[in-house]
Image (cartoon, coloured by chain):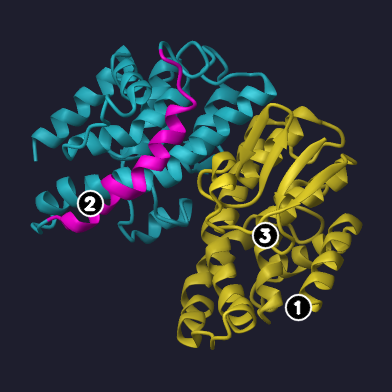
Chain colours: A yellow, B cyan
Amino acid sequence: MIKVYGVHGSPFVRKVYIMLGLKGISFEMVQQRPFANDPEYKMINPLGKVPTLVDGELTLCDSKVICRYIENAYPEPRLYPEDPAERAKADWLEEFSGTSVTELATGIFFQRFMRPRVFKQEPDEKFISEIITNRLPPLLAYLEGHIPQEGFVFGDFTMTDLAIVSPFINASYAGYEVDPESWPRLAGLINRVKANPEVAAVLAEEARMFGAR
Amino acid sequence: MIKVYGVHGSPFVRKVYIMLGLKGISFEMVQQRPFANDPEYKMINPLGKVPTLVDGELTLCDSKVICRYIENAYPEPRLYPEDPAERAKADWLEEFSGTSVTELATGIFFQRFMRPRVFKQEPDEKFISEIITNRLPPLLAYLEGHIPQEGFVFGDFTMTDLAIVSPFINASYAGYEVDPESWPRLAGLINRVKANPEVAAVLAEEARMFGAR
């Protein structure tokens, strides 16, 4: 059986849990915190990040790589576009969302949510304000240009929609919501993705976990 | 005609130039320095990085995404494996090499090569020593475990080999060579990749450019 190392609440692990659910693939969740400096885990994931997927002989790190593998090895139902140009656009939007956008969105999440709860420290509000006021808006504007007014980026729901929305779920735990006046398409997409039953089920698990702290 | 925005010497742009050469695809090189804070360029690449590929209506950023698109849109000759598990392994090794390994290798390159030449500053030797002594060795050991004694990662030469080697070409400009006693497979792969005629041709262009400064 496929094993996924990770924890609920990571914007990257979330994508893999939801994708496996949407494909109807059973898997074992192995609890693994990121950056735990665990030498045994670093044998399978040299950076100590999450998620890691193990499928038989194959060990894969990085959620983009894992999700693309799941799509290729377990094609139905399709969760990425197949046309080479659309597929490349999907790859780029997932890369952009998983690096620069996630860095900023999880910066807010870390400062306002994790830091007080886990480290018993005050958030660095100057740093948060720099993200919200200066660094995030150009990236939101870029995403806005790739999102339709209704529906999803490639018509039906795909992993691209989830990849775009996932970092904002973490930011929302820290009280940051994308302003629907300034970025109506992105704000609408976030709501549509959250309404997907499989997404909603995983978010309910996250809520249970965070509530139980 | 395909346009590639970038400059010789970038470990990422290098991959795209070489791949297009290997596929026999003509393209226009548009000179673009990374992080130039050029508002016009940021319209097509929101992070201001290089390379960007423009193919008709399609604009793509990120070398992994670009190289995967070239492979899918222009399949011959094959430069990535096709089996889903091998393909995923290729994706992961390209991701790992293009992020963590490149960050460290270009750290050496920036400090010892770019900083004195471009910024007329001394390199930070303490930072370089931390990279070479502590941070790089575990990543080199991980790569070593994925490289065969002879030939290439998937038998014949693929983009995975070039993705692994490209950051070390930059490090070698700064006088850092992977120690063949400690990591003989990686050191051997670097030599075999550099001997590929298309790779050698692009490296000759880089040498001309750096020599002309």
**Closer-to-camera residue (A138/B30):** A138
Instruction: Give the alpha-carbon distance from disc 1 to disc 2, as whole Å.
Output: 41 Å
The residue under the point 90% across, 41% down is A24
Circle nearer the N terminus (1, 3): 3
Quick check: A3 above or below A134?
Answer: above
The residue under the point 65% across, 73% down is A171
Nearest to viewer (mark 1 / mark 3): 1
Q: Which residue is mark 2?
A: B128
Both marks 1 and 3 on one chain: yes
Numbered range of the magenta stretch: B123-149
Task: From the viewer's perspective, tell me whether residue B12 is left or right of residue A62.
Answer: left
Instruction: Give the alpha-carbon distance from disc 3 to disc 2, as whole Å.
Output: 32 Å
Q: Is residue B28 shown to the viewer in this render?
A: no
- On the image, the x and y values in percent for residue A198 come to 88, 55
> Which residue type does callout 3 highlight?
Pro
**Closer-to-camera residue (A78/A119):** A119
Q: Which residue is mark 1?
A: A213
